[in-house]
Amino acid sequence: MLIQCREYWGRVELRETPPETVLLTDAIYLPFSRDAAWGLFAPDGSAIEAAVDTHGPDAATEILQPAPDALRAGAAHTAPYLYGGVLNPHYGHFLINSLARLWPLLDADRPRRRILFHGAAQPEDWFRLPFVRDAFGALDLGPQDIAILPRPTRLLDVEVPATSFREQQFIHRAYAELCRRIGSALLRGRAPRSGLPAAYLTKTGLAEGVGRIVNEEPLERRMREAGIDVVRPEELTLAEQAALFMERPAVLGTAGSAFHTSIFVPPQARLMVLSPIPGPNSNFAMIDAANGNLAEYLHDPGTEVAAQNEGAFITTFRLPDPIAAADEMIERLRLLRPGAVPAMSVPPPEPAPPVPPPVPAPASPPASPPASPPASPPGENRMPTDDFFDEFFPADFWPSIAAETFPTDEISMFGDPGTFRALIEKFRPRTIIEIGSWKGHSANYMADVCRSMGLASRILCIDTFLGSVEHWHLPEARPQLHRRNGRPTMLERFLGNTLARGNAGTVFPLTLDSKNAAFLLDLWQVRADMIFIDGAHDPDSVRADLTGYLPLLAPGGVLWGDDYQFEPLAEAVHAFAAERGMQVMVSERKWVLVTPGVLETMFGPGFAARTAWAGWVHP
């Protein structure tokens, strides 16, 4: 059975502000070399920090100290350059590394500079690579606009933009804007096609790459039998690849650089990616966050490493049952995105062909770090919270619900969205508990924010979905229950709203009263990074919720709530805090219980000297 990936290999950070630039008036350019120091250096031999790229989740660098004679450059170049970094012939690294410093080109009024790269060939050679030619051409760049210097050169005017995409670290909104401009130029004049089925991106035709599934062919065949188009991205032009993500209702495949192409077009297709490791590379999540993609990453816990550095691939994986994986993806897609799979029966299961025993991994790692971490065995790094979600919300939970039709309801009392976003940005929660969810508007907004930040969060919504005493007692409030056969239909509206917002798999309803839910969660040792209380507002209920859920708060997490304007509620919150020697912060209708670490996370050093913090007051 496939499981949803909840963590990523590397950091995920979306930065809204543009990167900075540095103007150098005296720098040494050392040409690309596989054996000696290369890059941009100051005359004293120190590397220009703004021009350095890092790799991997640990932000590793590979800077060599140049020999003194290497810095003795010849005649100085006075021509103005814009530094573009390294030209990488690998498609994915070209997108992430080689385009990431070109964001200043978004300003059409800026003076034009020739773009200076490091690379192992001359510009004319690079433009023979179709994706390089097409991407640069979309930016109105030709070989004459690119410079790769063959020898050490002193530069007197070079502008160095900071990267807008540091792999497995952060991405700037400017990167997405640049790629969207490329996509617009690539697809200009192309009439989008409609009525197409989903597409599966296969790697079976690749001659080389970072990773592959050695037994992908049965999976590919299953997709084709279900009516899904099987596509080899390397055989398409860059424009044709981008069009896939614009024209198809869904794009499936195993994790690979082809999914990075989604950054060129507005989010249209649902992405379903089979990851050979439980924590996919965070570059995928950052592209999803910057572009607003609706993506999910699935993993088969039985996947194993079949070989390392075999042929032209760094890591070769083997699925335990590729046909079962395909069937589960197809069925999941059929339920979550109706129409993506043609209305035809999936062929009956067939036995998988026998495969040879797995090739053991080498005893010692390769000299350079592998491009993907080894697959974790089932159970490694798991927490009781993971066990709780797997037990009560298995993989078929939302697909089975999506097979039915539920009403949606846009009428909401949800308010202060900026506060939700600000706290999620600060605390970056993996698990959120919401007490009192009603129709799910606040939970779905939190899910949208988490997805925009690349967070693989889970939101547990605790509610009976039967309404409060007020809803039953007050004639003017009773219609909000939408009773049918004497029972409120709030759960149906919660499910309908969640499906409509595309948050199935992120938002989960726990249909219990808050007291029993707290007891259940404590039995399972569930801990949450963020707990939002918006249940009953009478003092006894508020105190009961605080008492029951504070022990479920993970270290460094935040417990907060709504409707501070109700005096009985506010008094109950302050009384609870005072009994425990805590403080309360307030911003309009929202309140935060100041547990250990909250102020440091929200405001950083120096907070103690203030009496008001960014709109928050300390009553």
Image (cartoon, rainbow, N blue to C red):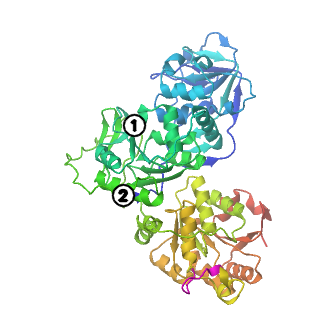
Residue plotted at (30% across, 32% down): 311
Q: Is residue 486 magenta?
A: yes
Give the total number of marks visible in the rendering. 2
Please determine whether, in this image, residue 52 is positioned above or below residue 471. Answer: above
Q: Is residue 83 above or below residue 270?
A: above
Separation of marks 2 and 1 at Cα, in angstroms: 22 Å
Amino acid type of the residue that numbered disc 1 sits on in the rendered structure? Arg
Instruction: Kindly report the secondary structure that dominates the magenta region of the rendered protein.
Output: loop
Give residue 191's quadrant in the image: top right
- Pick the quarter of the image with the N terminus: bottom left
User: What residue is shown with label 1?
Assistant: 232
Q: Which quarter of the rendering shows the C terminus?
A: bottom right
What's the residue at 27%, 57% (across, down)?
Answer: 348
Horizontal relation, residue 250 to residue 454: left or right: left
How packed is label 1: few (under 14 Cα within 10 Å), some, or many (20 or more)? some
CB atoms of marks 2 and 1 within 8 Å: no
- From where the camera sits, is residue 64 visible? no
In this rendering, would 366 be left or right of 337?
left
Structural crowding at the residue carrying mark 2, measured as other residues with C-alpha within 10 Å and reported as few (<14), some (14–19) or many (≥20): some
Give the mark nearer the N terminus: 2 vs 1.
1
Q: Secondary structure at mark 2?
A: helix
Q: Amino acid at mark 2?
A: Glu
Residue 355: x and y in percent read 21, 47
Assign a secondary structure to mark 1.
Answer: loop
* Magenta stretch: includes residue 563: no
Q: Name the spot of residue 147 as percent of width and height, x first.
A: 59, 18
Numbered range of the magenta stretch: 480-488
Q: Which residue lies most toward the bottom here?
A: 473
In the rendered view, does 397 fall on the left or right side of 247? left
Q: Residue furthest top?
A: 75
Q: Which residue is mark 2?
A: 328
